[in-house]
Image (tube, grey):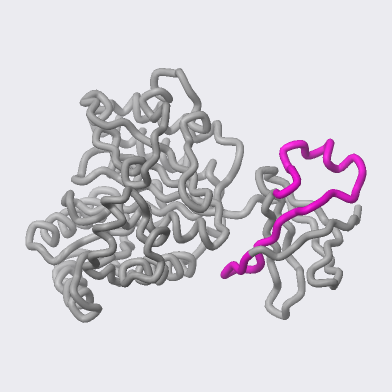
Amino acid sequence: MSQRAGISTTAARLSGLHLRLIHWDWGDFENIYPKIKIGTIIALYLGEMGHVDKSLCLANSGMVEMHMVEVSGQKADLHRIARPQPVRVIAVTSGKGGVGKTNVSVNLGVTLASQGYDVMLMDADMGLANVDVMLGLHPDHDLSHVLDGTCSLEDVMCTGPEGLRVIPASSGIQAMSELSAAEHAGVISAFSEISFNPDVLIIDTAAGINESVMTFSRAAHEVVVVVCDEPASITDAYALIKLLSNEYGIYRFRVVSNMVQSAQEGRLLFNKILKVTDRYLDVALDFAGVIPEDEYLRKAVQKQRAVVDVYPRSKSALAFKKLAKKSISWPIPTAGGQLQFFVERLIMANQKEIGARI
């Protein structure tokens, strides 16, 4: 089956072009995929030689069909494939609170969304959630309503800057900060009901080393550890890495040096942790980058906006864009990369927590 659709280029993307569907030309096709509306964003992936040889992904459909499309007046063939694109799952954690972890999660998510990626940001700090606060969002529902059966996970999602999908948690509810393994299973099962696969899932974990931090970190493909140049932050980051390595078999960590005065200071901070882990642990640490101390970042927080959104040329915003670019270069899972695989990893992690208690 081969058809033509008119499309117009709207933005560039690292792995290809980001395009917007502007009209249908093929009769009953719209009836087959009713969720795909005029204005839906679609992605065009180019091969190494510039040929269109992978797919035209229709957003929200989970399906890929072969079509003829027209790009800048030139026709291009697109080959049919059946599998969804893999999902990058990134857990952002820190050990110590107050080191800017949530700022990293929020600005990484908004930056990737602005580049055309479908990004879902989950606030996994169940009892002291603040992702929605930092973005000036006012959700009517949160994860507590998912647990009590009032809403599905998609029901509680709200939209942030650049189309970022935010899963808000609750704040000030002690019971949510002390979820049992069975209650964690309720959150996990909610993921299996999501009807789409995002490109990137970012999990903003709670501070510390509680059960939820362990569970989500173990299920993620990448664990990003945010650290600042304070003894308590360095000590707690090392303790977190040690626990995830020795007890749960995680051996690769990406380290972000936050709130530093210069790139050199950020590298020295990373080297402090690297020196200790190289001596005592069997882990691989990667220097993911530096986020500088920046007055504009403080102003953005006061405005309840992402700094990359409100002050895009500030020092910290440019640093977040570098981090986003690097994160997309991290290896994509070649097998089991869909959201369902993340759910399965969560279930396995949760079952081990239950087993450890028996």
- Residue 217 sits above or below residue 154 on the image: below
First to last magenta residue range: 11-39
Closer to us: 55 or 33: 33
Closer to us: 212 or 167: 167
Q: Position of residue 348 (x, y in %)?
A: 40, 38
Residue at x-position 38% and y-position 29%: 143
**Image-based side of 121 in relation to 244, left or right:** right
Q: Position of residue 294 (x, y in %)?
A: 24, 67
Inspect the magenta stretch and tell me whether residue 16 lies in it. yes
Count of number-bearing discs:
0
From this viewpoint, which residue is outermost toward the left? Answer: 231
Closer to us: 175 or 171: 171
Q: Position of residue 165 (x, y in %)?
A: 49, 44
Inspect the magenta stretch and tell me whether residue 261 lies in it. no
Q: Quarter of the image holding residue 166?
A: top left
**Image-based side of 305 in relation to 63, left or right:** left
Q: Quarter of the image holding residue 148?
A: top left
- In which quadrant is the C terminus drawn? top left
Residue at x-position 34% and y-position 24%: 182
Q: Position of residue 260 (x, y in %)?
A: 19, 70
Closer to us: 250 or 106: 106
Residue at x-position 75% and y-position 46%: 38
Residue at x-position 34% and y-position 25%: 183
- Residue 188 sits above or below residue 89 on the image: above
